[in-house]
Image (cartoon, rainbow, N blue to C red):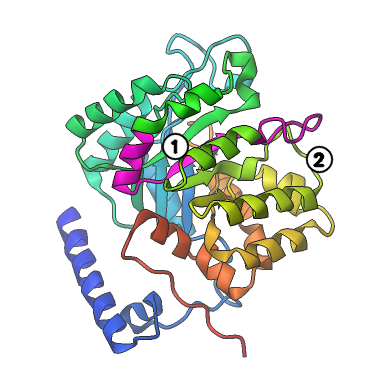
């Protein structure tokens, strides 16, 4: 089975190469000569999921083959395979940290190893997966380079992404999480160099603030961007969260624009349905964000932030993909191709793959 799909993969790559030679203007649109993407007839749901937790906080996970089946069925062609940046202790009965205040949650290697094992066992082609290092404890950066060395020994070449890691996540404060400090961020230098040398993107969860203090933690992300200008840094959820649902969209967009202008290495992550539920769906707000994304089409990637705990099934994934993709409908063709059809994601990962062109309206 895998031998066949591998051969098909090679044939597909050869066809793509021929199409590119035959049509110098076309990126990957003419894959096998099938033409452009028709937005009027085809789904608006994103074809890549850059933010997908294959492992839960605790308890049983959705089996790997079942979850990759969800992606295939929903038209997601590529995904980042995250572990989870906060695990409950093995002796805890909790499956969600919010239900267990006082129980400490910490990053762990366990779920990265489980993901890597599953990945190397099958190496699926559709969807293709980028396995991620999620174990990184940003408050204890000295533990990270030895961790990467261990991963290199056990799974050479397998890990192509880092994150989601927590710089500051208010939802975890009752579970003993504290924000990384300026001193911690300075001490990230050795592992950030490894990521830079390998071209590995890192997705950082860093809350902007809370409804009461909306930019309380902005300085931490700014320090990160200032200290590591040549790293590929992805800001999860654009800094928004359930703790910050009432920010003025113009103010939020203003901050995002300033940081994108100042830091060419920054990419924004649109994952998590909180963005749709608390911002994009409000009257007049979707247009504001769509105009912003249309103006920065190359700087944004989509994702669901689905967490694969066993109490969920395909319908939950399908729904989270649909909700987090609603913003796509408001984008112009350029931003739609770059974001929803995966062009930015492919470029960020350094893949040869390219998104189809959008058919011209007419
Ligand atoms: Zn997440």
User: Which of the numbered marks, if any, corresponds to residue 163?
Assistant: 1
The one of 341 and 181 positioned closer to us in this rendering: 181
Q: Residue 213 location in percent, x, y?
A: 78, 30
Q: Is residue 121 magenta?
A: no
Q: Residue 83's quadrant in the figure?
A: top left
Secondary element at tag 1: strand
Q: Which residues are magenta?
A: 191-218
- Residue 342 seen by the camera: no
- Whole-percent x and y of residue 193? 34, 38
Badge 2 density bin: few <14, some 14–19, many ≥20, Cα 10 Å: some
Give the farthest residue toward the bottom.
362
Q: Which residue is mark 2?
A: 246
Residue at x-position 24% and y-position 45%: 122
Q: Residue 337: horizontal and vertical position, in percent? A: 52, 69
Q: Is residue 13 left or right of residue 355?
A: left
**Res. 215 mark:** none
Is residue 199 on the magenta stretch? yes
Q: N-terminal of the two: label 1 or label 2?
A: 1
Tell me the crowding category of disc 1: few under 14, some 14 to 19, or many 20 or more residues within 10 angstroms, Cα based: many
Query: Which sits in the foreground, 58 or 239?
Result: 239
Return the residue nearer the eye: 22 or 81: 22
The relative height of residue 23 versus residue 52 in the rendered view (above or below) is: below
| CA separation in Å, label 1 and label 2 | 27 Å
């Amino acid at each position: 089975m895998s031998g066949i799909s591998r051969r098909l993969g090679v044939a597909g790559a050869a066809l793509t190469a021929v199409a590119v030679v035959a049509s110098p203007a076309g990126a990957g649109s003419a894959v096998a000569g099938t033409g452009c993407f028709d937005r009027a007839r085809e789904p608006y749901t994103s074809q890549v999921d850059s933010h997908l937790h294959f492992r839960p906080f605790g308890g049983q996970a959705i089996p790997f083959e079942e979850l990759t089946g969800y992606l295939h069925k929903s038209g997601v062609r590529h995904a980042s395979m995250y572990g989870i940046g906060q695990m409950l202790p093995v002796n805890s009965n909790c499956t969600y940290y919010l239900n267990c205040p006082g129980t400490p949650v910490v990053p762990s290697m366990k779920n990265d190893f489980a993901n890597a094992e599953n990945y190397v066992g099958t190496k699926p082609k559709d969807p293709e997966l980028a396995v991620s290092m999620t174990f990184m404890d940003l408050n204890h950066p000295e533990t990270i380079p030895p961790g990467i060395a261990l991963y290199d020994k056990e799974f050479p070449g397998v890990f192509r992404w880092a994150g989601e890691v927590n710089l500051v996540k208010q939802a975890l404060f009752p579970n003993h999480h504290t924000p990384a400090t300026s001193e911690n961020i300075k001490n990230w230098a050795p592992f950030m160099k490894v990521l830079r040398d390998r071209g590995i993107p890192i997705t950082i969860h860093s809350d902007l603030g809370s409804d009461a203090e909306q930019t309380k933690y902005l300085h931490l992300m700014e320090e990160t961007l200032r200290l590591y200008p040549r790293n590929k840094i992805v800001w999860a959820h654009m800094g928004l969260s359930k703790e910050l649902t009432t920010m003025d969209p113009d103010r939020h967009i203003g901050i995002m624009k300033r940081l994108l202008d100042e830091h060419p290495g920054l990419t924004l992550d649109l994952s998590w349905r909180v963005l749709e539920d608390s911002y994009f769906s409000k009257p007049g707000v979707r247009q504001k964000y769509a105009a912003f994304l249309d103006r920065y089409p190359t700087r944004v990637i989509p994702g669901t932030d689905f967490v694969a705990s066993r109490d969920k099934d395909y319908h939950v994934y399908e729904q989270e993909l649909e909700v987090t993709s609603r913003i796509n409908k408001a984008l112009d063709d350029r931003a739609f191709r770059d974001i929803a059809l995966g062009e930015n994601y492919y470029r960020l990962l350094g893949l040869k793959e390219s998104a189809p062109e959008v058919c011209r309206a007419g």
